[in-house]
Structures are given as structure tokens and as C-alpha cells.
Image (spheres, rainbow, N blue to C red):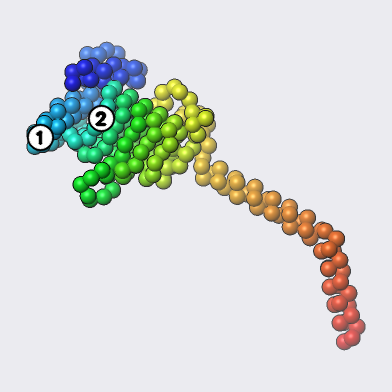
Amino acid sequence: MFKKLGEDIDAIMARDPAAKSRLEVMLCYPGFHALLFYRLGNAAWRRGWKLLGRFLSHLGRVLTGIEIHPGATIGRRFFVDHGMGVVIGETAEVGDDVTLYQGVTLGGTSLHQGKRHPTLGDGVIVGSGAQVLGPLNVGKGARVGANAVVLKDVPEGVTVVGIPAQVAISRSKQEDAFCAYGTPAGDMPDPVARALDGLLQEVTALKARVVELEGSPPAMAKQASNGRGHAASRDGN
């Protein structure tokens, strides 16, 4: 357990430029404190000391504002940045090198006792305020943008944004560098705007086709025939 905590400190040093020393991380980072309480509570939970595990989890929540159920599974080098309001449910599974920001919820959507919380693969980044709900999978290296609501599986290596979350950047365009808050700071395509652009292009193409058909010889001949018929009708009257 202490080796894992040492790795957690190193992960914070690597991912937060504001961290100046390991001692500062140990004394001043609520994300590390919450993880310390989780590691202790999880050890008790796995040994069958459920009440002690829950008490340690509750104590960590009171002191840090971060709620991690002792039954959750969390991998190595885990980092909760800022942290206030983070909730990780009982059956959540978090891989190695995962980063969460403040206000993130890994929540359940059912009342049954089985698997009901998300599974996050290695290297996932979840931005502030994001809600990842249900027994879904977020693939390795994926990024969940700030305030996104994830309700279905996320493929490996993509960035998802919005409510409900949709793929904004595909794996082929994904950068390998660490992405704070899971949200690229540069230009990022809007899935809704992209869909609207596609519809406008289709409407433009249909209009051009209609104009083409109206100007074709059969259409012109039909219009001329209709014109002669109307003229004959007027003469008969």
C-alpha cells in the first residue's frame, strides 16, 4: 500500500505544475488525502471489516470533500486534482494513470447489488463536472470533457463532450500529450454544428437537383403542353 501511495505522489508531481515538492503534496493536496483514506478503507473492506472501511471513507469525505467508496477498485498513480465534489461509487473500477477533476461523478443508475458503476481504462482523463453513469466502459486513453454526461461506452483514445456525450475528436487525431480537464484548449469541432453543416449541405444539393430537373427538356415540354391546354380551354369558353 505504501508503495502505491508513493507512486500516487509521483503522479501528482508529474501532472500538476503547481506541485513544488513531495512534502507539499503530502500536506496540502486533498486528492492525496482522500486517496490515503481510500487505500486504508479498501484494505479493511477487502478483509471483511465493512463498517471500518465505510467509517474511514466517511472520515475522508468529511476532511476532503471527496467521496470514494471503499469497495471501489482504483489502480496505480491515481490523481484527483482539486477534488471537491468528486464521487466514486462502490462498483466503480479505475485503471492505472487515471486523472479526475473536481465535481466528477462515477455513479450508478440501478438499485441492484451487482455491477452498476463505470469502468475507466488506463490513462483516462475526466474533466471537471463530468458525470459518467452506469455500468459502462470508458476505453484506454479516452478523455471526457468538462461537464459531459456519459451514458454509453466510450471507445479507446477518443475525446467526448456534451450532453449526452458524443465523440468530438477521433483516435486518429488524438494527441498523446496530457490534456488538462480532458478538454483540448485549441479548436475542437462541435458535433452539433458538424451535424447541422451536413444537413445544410444536403439541402443545398437537393435544391440544385430540383433546379436541374425543372430545367430539363421533359419538364419544359410538359410545361409547354400545359400552357397550350390552358389556352385551348380559354378559346372554347
Q: Which mark is residue 189?
A: none
Work out whether 175 lies above or below 115.
Answer: above
Instruction: Give the label on residue 74, or none.
Output: 2
Toward the right, the furthest residue is 235
131 lies above or below 76? below
Residue for point 21% across, 17% down: 3
Q: Earlier in the sequence, mark 1 or mark 2?
A: 1
* Residue 67 image offset from top left, x and y in percent: 21, 35
Q: Quadrant of residue 151?
A: top left
Q: Nearer the viewer, residue 103 or 96?
A: 96
> Circle 2: is it few (<14), some (14-19), or many (20+) Cα within 10 Å?
many
User: Residue 210's quadrant in the figure?
Assistant: bottom right
Q: Which residue is mark 1?
A: 48
Amino acid residing under circle 2? Ile
Q: Is residue 226 above or below residue 106?
A: below
The percent position of residue 222, horizontal first and vertical second, equals 83, 68
> The disc labelled 1 sits on which kind of residue?
Gly
User: Is residue 7 placed above or below 215 in the rendered structure?
Assistant: above
User: How many C-alpha atoms fall within 10 Å of the one at disc 1: few (<14), some, or many (≥20)?
Assistant: few
Q: Position of residue 146 (x, y in %)?
A: 39, 36
CA distance separating discs 1 and 2: 18 Å
- Residue 56 horizontal side relative to residue 146, left or right: left
Kindly report which numbered mark, 1 or 2, lies closer to the viewer in this rendering: 1
Residue at x 18% of width, y 21% of height: 1
| Residue 116 seen in render | yes
